Amino acid sequence: MSVDAANPLAQELNPWLAADARFNEAAGRLAMDEGIRKILRSPSREITVYVPVLLDDGRIEVFTGYRVQHSIARGPAKGGIRYAPDVSIEEVRALASWMTWKCAVVNIPYGGGKGGVICEPSILSPGELERLTRRYTAEIIEFIGPEKDVPAPDMNTTEQVMAWIMDTYSMHMRQTVTGVVTGKPLDLGGSRGRPEATGRGCMIVTLEALARLGMKPEETTVVIQGFGNVGGMAARLMSRRGFHVIAVIEYDGAVYNAKGLDIEALLQHRKETGSIREFAGGEEIDRDQALFLECDVLLPAAKEGVITSRTAPKLNCKIVCEGANGPTTAPADHILSEKGIFVIPDILANAGGVTVSYFEWVQDRQGFFWNEDLVNQRLEEIMVNSFRDVVKYSEKYKAHNRLAAYMLALDRVAFAIKLRGLYA
Ligand code: NAD
């Protein structure tokens, strides 16, 4: 993703510039030592690999793949692998740094990493996808491992892809090593509660925000953008908890019911028809305008760059809970802050996923698996404590929540670096 200097919106949407803007602001407010700042700003390691794959028609194609380890100061690098045509080293680098801050906010013993392969997965056959995954894994094999760097699913990489990575790594090690990746199928060392974890985490931190603002779930309206893993699960769990999910926005339409949508019925409708459109339990509304509906909680759970300097002024909510990664651009941060909107930033709000990934890794290493109640209870404890830690920073430094979350994260990683000292 190259930065188009002549196009301000393209610059605003650039993930590396967004990560850098937040980093600089937080480091500045912490009056961080210049040397530590240099360490934290640069990735620890960037690997580029060229992955030859035999296609079904007999041709060989070579795909470009990356793995970036931004930091290993607090533990192994941790972060997903995405397969997409627009993957770039800049994007992977930004996402890797986000993982460092996210893991530090929830105080789990990981650094941050991210990987990606430039490809169009929708035109690859299952066999081609498997060969691509196995060869990419083999190319980065000396850099990953339960103690080094633990990949996970991201855009277009599934449980099955994780199973292939685990198997390839295990074949090289001549033993089964389940802890090399997370997001695996339950029967191969996955964790109970993982599919719901991110949506559950969103609900937990939203409940904390409501308590601070003196609001009750039964009197709270929610608009959710994206009805996939995060948005669908958040909708289900929040409506069970008494919230009124009044609108759901998808890429092909939006559905609205002022009294609250029947989320189980909408999930069923989407399963049967492949869309949320033509749902009998609500009216169809304009999907672009739906973002600006009057509501208590707006939960973007689809993609990055949704709340920008153009859309932020028009939002009509009290709380933004960022289920997606990077839904808000850096210039929009200040607009939300001026509007008095309580933002639960992505590196806190959607950290339930990586937290249960951490539980998966712990369970794999112990060879002892927890029941779902224990997973959920431990998740809740971590999310609540992290929310409160961010709020403490926000009060101490008079900073908006995103800045506070970055300051907390930078402080934790910088502390680990100072404690370890510089190996020379
Ligand atoms: P998903 O693919 O399961 O769901 C995304 C949904 O958003 C899909 O239903 C898709 O149709 C919809 N969508 C796509 N473009 C849209 C648009 N323009 N408007 C409205 N809806 C649109 O993905 P997911 O796993 O739910 O991830 C969603 C976001 O949450 C991503 O930013 C991801 O990085 C982030 N995230 C996911 C997890 C996780 O555990 N799955 C963890 C942390 C962060």
Image (cartoon, rainbow, N blue to C red):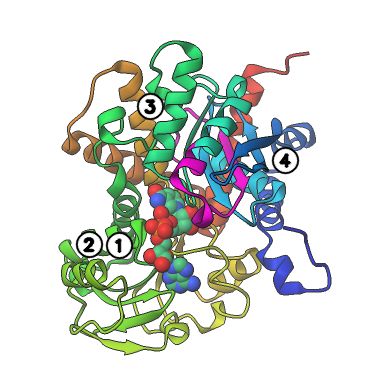
- Total residue callouts: 4
**Residue behind label 3 places its C-beta within 8 angstroms of ligand 1:** no
Judged by depth in the image, the label closer to the viewer, 3 or 4, is 3
The answer to whether residue 113 is magenta is yes
Q: Residue at x 63, y 27 (%)?
A: 139
Question: What residue is disc 4 on?
Answer: 41
Q: Residues within 10 Å of mark 3 (few under 14, many from 20)?
A: many
| Whole-percent x, y for residue 234 in the image | 29, 60
Residue at x 29%, y 52% (from the top left corner): 200
First-in-chain label (2 vs 3): 2
SS type, badge 3: helix
Q: Which residue is mark 2?
A: 236
Q: Of helix, strand and loop, which one carries label 2?
A: helix
Amino acid on which disc 3 is placed: Trp
Q: Quadrant of the C terminus?
A: top right
Q: Nearer the viewer, mark 4 or mark 1?
A: 1
- How far apart are the two marked residues, 1 and 3, measured between alpha carbons? 25 Å
Name the image quarter holding residue 164. Answer: top left
Residue indicated by mark 1: 232
Is-magenta flag for residue 393? no
Q: Residues within 10 Å of mark 2 (few under 14, many from 20)?
A: many
Residue 4 visible in image: yes
- Find disc 3 in the rendering and name its residue: 361
Residue 314 vertical position relative to residue 220 in the rendered view, above or below: below
Amino acid type, mark 4? Arg
Mark 1 secondary-structure assignment: helix
Tell me the distance, in whole angstroms, between the alpha carbons under discs 2 and 1: 6 Å
- Residue 26 position within the rendered picture, expressed as x and y whole percent measured from the top left: 65, 49
Contact flag, marks 2 and 1 (Cβ < 8 Å): yes
